[in-house]
Image (cartoon, helix red, strand yellow):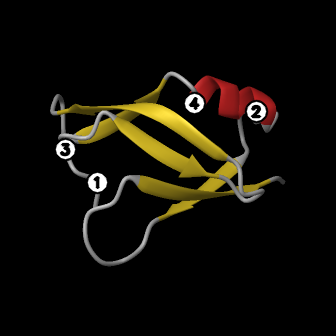
Amino acid sequence: MLDTLLTTVNIIDDCGNIWVCELTFATFPYEHFKIGRRWNRFVEARRLREGVKIRGGAPMVGSHDTIYLDVIYN
């Protein structure tokens, strides 16, 4: 689980690249996180387009500041 006080998150893609992205916790209309800033660079670098699937994960125990992503191209 991500800590609601975090302002950045490390995203590690399936190639081992680390992307430090801005993280914002929002509560309306429901509790969720918004990933911003360098996320766009990640999308451009990986040439992601609508319809591409991304599988995310994190270690099962404790709070973390890292998300691991696996891009699944159709």
From this view, report whether residue 26 is shown above or below residue 53. Answer: above
Measure the C-alpha gap from mark 1 to mark 4: 17 Å
The percent coordinates of residue 70 (x first, y second) are: 67, 59
Q: Nearer the viewer, residue 30 or 63?
A: 63
Tell me: 41 left or right of 39: right
Query: In the image, residue 66 lies at what x, y percent?
Result: 45, 55
The amino acid marked with disc number 3 is Thr
Q: Which residue is mark 2?
A: 49
Secondary structure beneath dot 4 equals helix
Q: Nearer the viewer, mark 2 or mark 3?
A: 3
Crowd around label 4: few <14 · some 14–19 · many ≥20 (10 Å)? some
Residue 74 horizontal/vertical position (percent) = 84, 54
Residue beneath the point at 68% across and 26% down? 41
Q: Label 2, label 3: how many angstroms apart (C-alpha)?
A: 29 Å
Q: Secondary structure at mark 1?
A: loop
Q: Residue at x 49, y 33 (%)?
A: 21
Q: Are marks 1 and 4 in contact (CB under 8 Å)?
A: no
Name the amino acid type tagged 4: Trp
Identify the residue under disc 4.
Answer: 39
State which tag comes first along the sequence, 2 or 1. 1
Asked whether disc 3 touches disc 4, contact meaning CB atoms under 8 Å apart, the reply is: no
Instruction: Name the residue that disc number 1 marks.
Output: 2
Spatial CA span between label 2 and label 1:
26 Å
Q: Give residue 4's mark.
A: 3
What amino acid type is highlighted by mark number 2? Arg
Indicate which label's residue lies in the foreground, 4 or 2. 4
